[in-house]
Amino acid sequence: MLGFLHKIVLKACHPMLCQAFPFAYPGLVANYHSKALEPFAGEVSYQTRLYERSVYAYVLVYNRLPEALIVLPSVSAFQRMLTHLAKEKARLNQEDWRRSFQDLIAIDRMFYRS
């Protein structure tokens, strides 16, 4: 899903997808880089579990990735770097590396609470 979102940021997808995932306004608290997408989290008033399982929840993760990942020029380079980071976590035998591929909270812990 993160590769899909990166494809949108690179504008290498259908223009309607770019409209469905617009860039966030500058100054958004969740922005860790210059190409953050709008997560629409503030518009969720009910059915939060549905939102948490949608692609928009992955926007929250994407927006927290470091700038060095976001500026990569292709989806394959982006995914290669994410895979490298996961393999490093596994090589260092960090206990949460396996769960990082199962749920959003573990992914967040893997990259930001090391």
Image (cartoon, grey):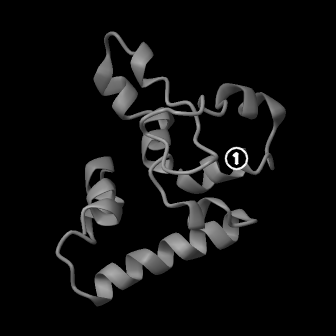
Q: Secondary structure at mark 1?
A: helix
Q: Quadrant of residue 111?
A: bottom left
Residue 45 vertical position relative to residue 20 in the rendered view, above or below: above
Residue under pointer 1: 9
Left or right: where 51 falls relative to 56: left
Residue 6 vertical position relative to residue 25 in the rendered view, above or below: below
Most extreme residue toward the front, as rendered? 27
What residue lies at 74% left-to-right and 65% top-to-bottom?
74
Quadrant including the C terminus: bottom left
Left or right: where 22 falls relative to 93: right
What residue lies at 43% left-to-right and 39% top-to-bottom?
30
Left or right: where 72 falls relative to 109: right
Residue 60: percent from left, percent from top: 43, 41
What residue lies at 57% left-to-right and 60% top-to-bottom?
67
Residue 55 or residue 39, whichever sits in front: 39
Residue 55: percent from left, percent from top: 50, 37
Residue 70 vertical position relative to residue 62 in the rendered view, above or below: below
Amino acid carrying mark 1 in the image: Val
At label 1, counting other C-alpha atoms closer than 10 Å, the crowd grade (few under 14, some 14-19, many 20 or more) is: many
Residue 64: percent from left, percent from top: 44, 50
Most extreme residue toward the top, as rendered? 45
Most extreme residue toward the bottom, as rendered? 91
Q: Total marks drawn?
A: 1
Q: Quadrant of residue 71?
A: bottom right
